[in-house]
Structure formats: C-alpha cells, structure tokens
Amino acid sequence: MAPERVLSIQSHVVFGYVGGKAAVFPLQCLGYDVDIAELRTHKVVNTVNFSNHAGYGRSGGSRTTAAELNSIFESMEQNELLMPSRLLTGYIPGAEALSAVEKLATKLKHAKPSLTYLLDPVMGDAGRLYVAADVIPVYQDMLPLATIITPNWFEAEVLTGIELKDFPSLRKALSILHLKYHVPNVVITSILMKPWLIAALPPSIRPPDDDHLLCITSSTTATHPTSRSDFESCPSIVHAQCVPTIPGYFSGVGDLFSALLLAHFHPGRPPTTSDTTPLSEAVFQALAKTHTLLQLTHEQAMSLPEEERLATDDELDSVDPLRRTRRMRGRELALIQGQDIIRGSALDDTRSLVAWDGFWSQ
Amino acid sequence: MAPERVLSIQSHVVFGYVGGKAAVFPLQCLGYDVDIAELRTHKVVNTVNFSNHAGYGRSGGSRTTAAELNSIFESMEQNELLMPSRLLTGYIPGAEALSAVEKLATKLKHAKPSLTYLLDPVMGDAGRLYVAADVIPVYQDMLPLATIITPNWFEAEVLTGIELKDFPSLRKALSILHLKYHVPNVVITSILMKPWLIAALPPSIRPPDDDHLLCITSSTTATHPTSRSDFESCPSIVHAQCVPTIPGYFSGVGDLFSALLLAHFHPGRPPTTSDTTPLSEAVFQALAKTHTLLQLTHEQAMSLPEEERLATDDELDSVDPLRRTRRMRGRELALIQGQDIIRGSALDDTRSLVAWDGFWSQ
C-alpha cells in the first residue's frame, strides 16, 4: 500500500536540525512520503530564534520569494503532483510567502476537504516576535483551514489578542480559537507554570516542582457537545500534561514536535480509551518522543569537551560569536542517533495526557 | 558517540526520489548526520533525464547560482560548520556551479586528507550527455580529489576519452582512471552485456541470460601491488557482479546506489575475507539493497491502475505530457515503504561480488 503523503513547507538549513531538517526525517521514519517545498531563509544554520544577534549575520544563500513558491506549486499542480493527504507548515518568513502558502492551503482544502493540515504558527516566543508583524493577520486568516494548530504560549496570545494572565483568559483564548477561528484541534505548548495555572490544574496534572512546562490540548472533534448551548459553554475536550524542562536551549524542538504530532494523528481510528481523543493520543506520543530525544541530545551535549558547551553569556558571545555557534552545534537534536526513539511506539517514562474534566465549568 | 557527518551536494526536487531526495534518507537511516547543500534546478519533479521532452517544460522554481553556493560554503566555514568526514556529490547542473563544488572539495580535502569523497560524475547515459559539455573538463580536474567515483558505462567513456568497445579498451579506461587521475576506487555501473564482455568474464560472473547488467569495481587501496612495475601491470584489484535488469525506467537509482555505497564504505575496517576489498564489500551491500528496493518499487508500480502505468510511447507522450508524469509518479523509488531494506544488513537473494583474478593479465 502506498504511504500517506505529506506536503511539508518549511525553512531549510544546510547544517543541523531545524525547520524541514527537524520535521522530514521523523515523518519519513514513521512511514510518510514527504514532498518537500523548502524556503531558503538566507540562513545556513539555525538563526531563526536569534536573528538580531551579531553572530548570525554571517550566513549565505538567498531568500525564497512568493513568486517562486507560487511557481513551484503551480508546476506541481500542472503535473498532477499536488496530491498530499496531509499538509505541514512551519516557519515561513514574511507575509508575502505566507500568503502564497495560504492560497495553496485553500486550494488543497477545497480539492480534498479531508486534508489534515497541521499549521504551526511560528512567530515568536517568550514575549518577542521574530517575524514581521504583518504575518499575524495572514495567520489569523489561515486558521480556519487548519486541522491542528500548535502555537506556543506567546503565539496563542498573539493570535487571539488575549493576554494569558489568568485562568479565565486561557479559557477565553481557547474558545476564540475554536469558535471564532473554527480550529478543531488546538495544542498550546511551553506554558510556564504560573501560580494561577497551578491553582487551576486538577491535582493529577500538577507538576512535582517548578521545572515543568504545561502542554494543553483542546479538541472539538469528539462527539461531545450535544447542543449549540452545550457547545458554547463547553466547546471542547481538554487534556493536559506537564513535561519536565531540560536545561539550556535547543533549536528545532517545535518543528520536531509538530512533525511527530502530525505523524501520530489518526482521526479515523477509534480512541484507545473513552478518556482520550485522537489529538490527545497523538500529543502523548509526540511529547514522549520529543522529550526522550531531548534527553538524549542533552546527554550527548554534556559529554562534549568544555569549549563546545560554554554557557550562554551575552557579553562574551558578542565578543566571540563562535562561542554561540559552538554551543548550538553541540546541542543539535540527536535525531540520527535517536531514530529508534522516533520509530518506537512504547515509551515508558511518560504518562498519558490527563483529561481536564472541569476545564470549561471550573 | 556522534555519528559520522556527510556533506551532500545534490539537486533538490519537491516531489519524488531523485538527487538529494534519493540519497539523504538512506544515509540518515544508516546512521549518518547529513548536511544538505541543495541545488535548485528549475525542476519540481525529476526531469534530469528527459530535459528535452516537451512534458517537462512545466516546472517551477529558480536555479542555484555558483555565487550562492560559494556564499553557503563560506558561511558554513566562518561558523565552523564545515566539518564533514565524508562528501557526496551528484548531479550538478553547469560548469560554474561544479567549479564552486570543486573549490570546496579541494579545501575540504586539504583540511582533512582522510575525507572520503564519493564523486558521482552525473553527465549522461546510453550515449547521450544531459549536461553541457563544459562540465567534462571540470570533472576530469576533480577526479584526483575523489575517494570513489561511480560513472556509468557512458560516463566512464566520457571521462577517459576511451570508447569501451572491447576488453583492452575497458582495461585502458580503468588504468587511466587509476594512474592518470589517481582515483583509488572506481565503480563502473550499468555495463551492457556485449558479447566481448561476456567472453572476457570469468565463468563464475557470467550472467544466466541477456537481461543483466554488469557492475565492475576496481580498487587500488588494498596492499596488492608490491612494486611500481607490478602496479603498472596490475594497477588494481577488480571485482564484478551481474545484476538482473528490472523492466522500465526508474529515476534516482544512481543517486540511491551512490548514497548506499558511501554509507557502507569502511576503508578502516579489515575486509571480511581475503577475497574482498572495502570497496567490493560496500558495492555488494549497495547493489543488493538497490536491487531489492527496485523490485519492491516495480511490484508496487505493477499494482497501480492501468492509466498510471501506460508504457512509454514517444508519440502519445508528446500529445499528452501527463502520460509520462503519471508513469513516472507510479515508479518513484519506494524508499519509505522499503526503509527496512535500507537498514537491513543481510540480503539473501544476491551473491557477493566475485574477484576477477585474471583481469589485468588476461
């Protein structure tokens, strides 16, 4: 049987695992044919998250234009090669290129309403945008096309215009994504464990210590709400899980997570238990594998010579930009060494996502 | 332990498995970190072998320039990211881009003399060049940098200027590659079973029927010749194997074969038996896996609906270019479904390469 086909539209770097380089290999390992439409971003190494840093001015290549993207998509269509059953989009630099992707996604969704589209609205982190602000309305326009979105905490704020400062604002943001933007599956990642959040969490989800981040999944695809008023008071089934943080910064983690999530998402299969949704099961797999791969990456980084793992120091880094490059090089995701983790289905050091029953009535 | 690192410089297509798309995934499956420097070639699908065909004018994208390649390599160097232990180059369109690759290969080889460089001089097949003729002298200049080259029959003729029309000319061509161009490991693929060749073959290598191609490996790396005169009368250890052909045309087979060969080439390991060389052992693995993957691809293509596997017909194809696209689409290498074949080390339906003892004295 021919594998399912994913069209992946991501940035490309020559060295290391970020963007397409973090997403494609896991999808292939998990049995998907991947059509790879790449965006050159002027960058040879991962610089997306540090584009203002002096050390990253030194990059080669040219940037993919919207006209080029359109031309690629048109050529695929003319040759009857635009036939994915799944679509994955990640970091796309600039509103023009993003609009070309929107046009394509619209066309694909129209031609095949069952298209599973995972849209990762990569825009920023920790209060800082690393794309131009004009991409925000384009992403908002695109949300109704998505089957799954995977914003981090900050991106969820940017998309909804809601500052996530207390539990009601979290509910408000989620309901905007479901009801205003019609996204059936929302995954919010990397949520900091603020006191109000810990207080709101059911005891079974509470982390044992502060070194955890929360991941929330919210899904309207299950046959849960029975009437319109039900739906408005309880628009979705919510699950959550806290994940221990691993010290230091790793690039490409979001891209890896989204690819694994898309690979494990099987909306047609009945859930394993009454307590899960196709989304929560896929997120469980994706979180477990991502975390295990990060642990492996961390262990390998720790075994490097000291000059390859000097701690972040903005002052020293700005004097010697190679300090940062060396550190990043030692912390590239260990996807190749960890490919058995990607392929494995049983991961024993993590718990399933927990259903957050009182989320909407709390 | 960190994996070995391959820098792969290949063409990129969005859809299907040719160039980098045929080479990178197998290398990754076999445990290599792959730095991917890609060449855009105006093409979305594989059109390398049919560039004059009307059906393939319809392609999108832009072409990578030599300046862009230089800029990418310089940026990698400045960031201390140019650190491969192996280099793989395949189809590179145009003498200017190829010269940029030559400059890089020279630099890498100078910095690390142990660099294993597999150069696949992709220029043409069956008597026809599909690159501009000005790449030929650039490839000839590059040959001394290579650890392994993998020309097909026609490319070996083009590189050496020797028409392979009888057994002495085959010997002459091989000795030119070893002695004039100093290539330690030569693999000539897809050799047609001409009567003179069958007559020259040791009985143990002779094919049972006409539907076979020969692969010859020739290696000077073993400690075989003991003096200069020995070396000149017997410049290398030669092995050969015939491979059954599979009907129809498949794209990307050479790219897959070269990647598997590079992955399995371990010059530092002692050969398994006195009868083999590191080259012949690697070629055995690469041939066996390529052949098994082709069989799988062929079986899958045969199971497609009839309109997806219409036979080649130049007249009908030129009226309806999609005929060819559909046929090619159904014959894309089954790398994803066959990934266990790539990973497997034991393949039982093939024989080892046979040492061709009398090759130089015949």
Image (cartoon, coloured by chain):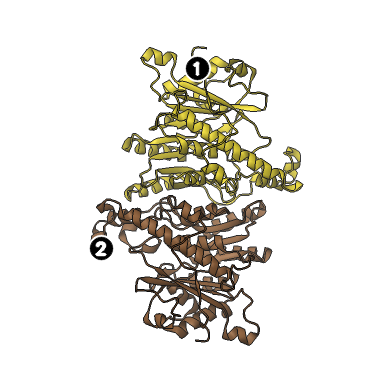
Chain colours: A brown, B yellow
Q: Residues within 10 Å of mark 1 (few under 14, many from 20)?
A: few
Residue A85, position as x, y percentages in the image? 63, 59
Q: Relative to B235, does residue B51 appear above or below in the rendering?
A: below
Q: How many marks?
A: 2
Q: Quadrant of residue B215?
A: top right
Q: Amino acid at mark 1?
A: Asp
Q: Amino acid at mark 2?
A: Asp
Chain letter belonging to callout 2: A
Distance between the Cα atoms at labels 2 and 1?
A: 63 Å
Q: Residue at x 49, y 55 (%)?
A: A342
Residue A339 visible from this viewpoint: yes
Q: Residue at x 38, y 56 (%)?
A: A297
Name the element at disc 1: loop
Q: Residue at x 58, y 58 (%)?
A: A70
State left or right for residue A8 relative to residue A62.
right
Q: Which mark is residue B357?
A: 1
Of residue B225 and residue B196, the one placed in the foreground of this image is B225
- Which residue has dot 2 on it? A313
Residue A217, position as x, y percentages in the image? 51, 73
Residue B144, position as x, y percentages in the image? 40, 28
Q: Relative to B35, does residue A130 appear above or below in the rendering?
A: below
Q: Which mark is residue A253?
A: none
Q: Relative to B136, does residue B205 appear above or below in the rendering?
A: above
Residue B124, position as x, y percentages in the image? 57, 33
